[in-house]
Amino acid sequence: MGNRASINNNKGLLGGGPFYLRSILNGIAMVFSCILLSVGCGTQTAKDTILMQSQSKELTETFFHEGIRRSYHIHLPPGFRSDRPSPLVLALHGGGGQGRRFDRSITRGTLVAAADSRGVVLVFPEAVKSHWFDGRAEILETERGYDDAGFISAVIDRMVKNYGIDSGRVYATGISNGGFMSIRLAMDFSEKIAAVAPVAAQLSMVLKDKTPRFPISIMIINGTMDPLVPFDGGHIGLAGFGRSRGEIMSTAETVEHFRLHNGCDRTPEMRRIPNRAPDDGTDAWVEKYANGRDGTEAILVRVKGGGHSWPGGGQYFRPKIIGAVCRDFNASEMILEFFLRHKRP
């Protein structure tokens, strides 16, 4: 990867993730939690222990990848049966965040609720040192990036083998650094993932010349007033808080990149989302490019006035830092509905 990028005291805030100022404390907490979680939890599988359940169930599993112990948290919905193939959604935390806290802190419990009502299995992987290597060298704390893409690919394989996941219905979403990582997964593993839904993220310049091997549906949910990840492209960062965390394409260019790859319609179907919370300062529109190859779509949910946040989720940091949270719609519900329309052929 070349010389190590310079690190300053504000690297968590500028890493493109939602737990900026807490990253150091979270890193300490992660060390202790991984020690606790690694005892006796690495070999349990659904085929061995879970055939039918009436309530949702939480599990944590670990395995070694590149010589590093990696972990991921599993949420099984009520009624889960390992002998009935279920869809799987990978939910990727932002830079400085934690997978175990993603649903509570970012989505305000809406992702688990949406998954439980639809029989969807959720997996919340943990990044090394709380940051995903999504291709941007500027976010690295070491001279090389960890093989996060390979790690997540291995998680998919384990879930298919051990939990009977439907291999044609695997999806990825995430916010900020996790959203960028979901786009990288679309580029690298379109043979395994049917659709992605990045939030507060778009295509980074280091990936601009790449295309997925197969058509893959995408829905991007971005706020036009995001103070960290600029809607119109440019350098990731916050004025007054240090260096760039990488250069990115605009949201419109990202959607067009996938529209062209999928062969979707040139003219979008436009729909305004009802403004159910007029006091939140946001207004949302859906631009859907349909009829792509293998039934794929490229969709932009443009949140006018929205910030670096998950619509319908939590105000995890001050509005002055991350901008407004849109309350007009539930992003978790919208994302899962989008995912379940798509299956790999």
Image (cartoon, rainbow, N blue to C red):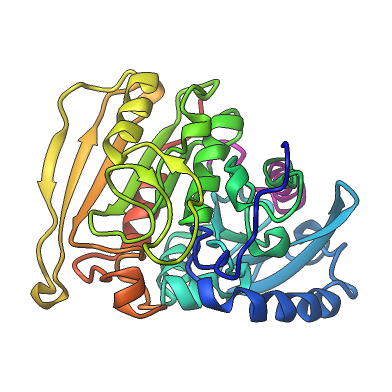
Asked if one can make out residue 217 in the rendered structure from this viewpoint, the answer is: yes
Residue 331 at x, y percent in the picture: 33, 61
Figure label count: 0
- x then y, percent, for residue 249: 37, 36
**160 falls in the magenta region:** yes
Identify the residue at image location x=60%, y=31%.
Answer: 188
Q: Residue at x 49, y 23 (%)?
A: 211
> Is the residue 213 above or below the residue 284 in the image?
above
State left or right for residue 47 relative to residue 90: right
Residue that appears at 51% across and 31% down? 207
Q: Say whether residue 225 is left or right of residue 205.
A: left
Q: Is residue 172 above or below residue 193?
A: below
The residues colored magenta run 153-169
Determine whether, in the image, residue 250 is placed left or right of residue 342: left
Residue 72 shows in this picture: no
Q: Is residue 170 magenta?
A: no
Question: Which of the 4 image quadrants contains residue 93?
Answer: bottom right
Query: Which is the main secondary structure of the residues drawn in magenta?
Result: helix
Q: Would you place residue 207 above or below residue 308 in this image?
A: above
Q: How far across and down, in percent of the image, does residue 129 sit?
A: 71, 64
Residue drawn where x is 13% and y is 74% of the image: 277
Q: Quadrant of the N terminus?
A: top right
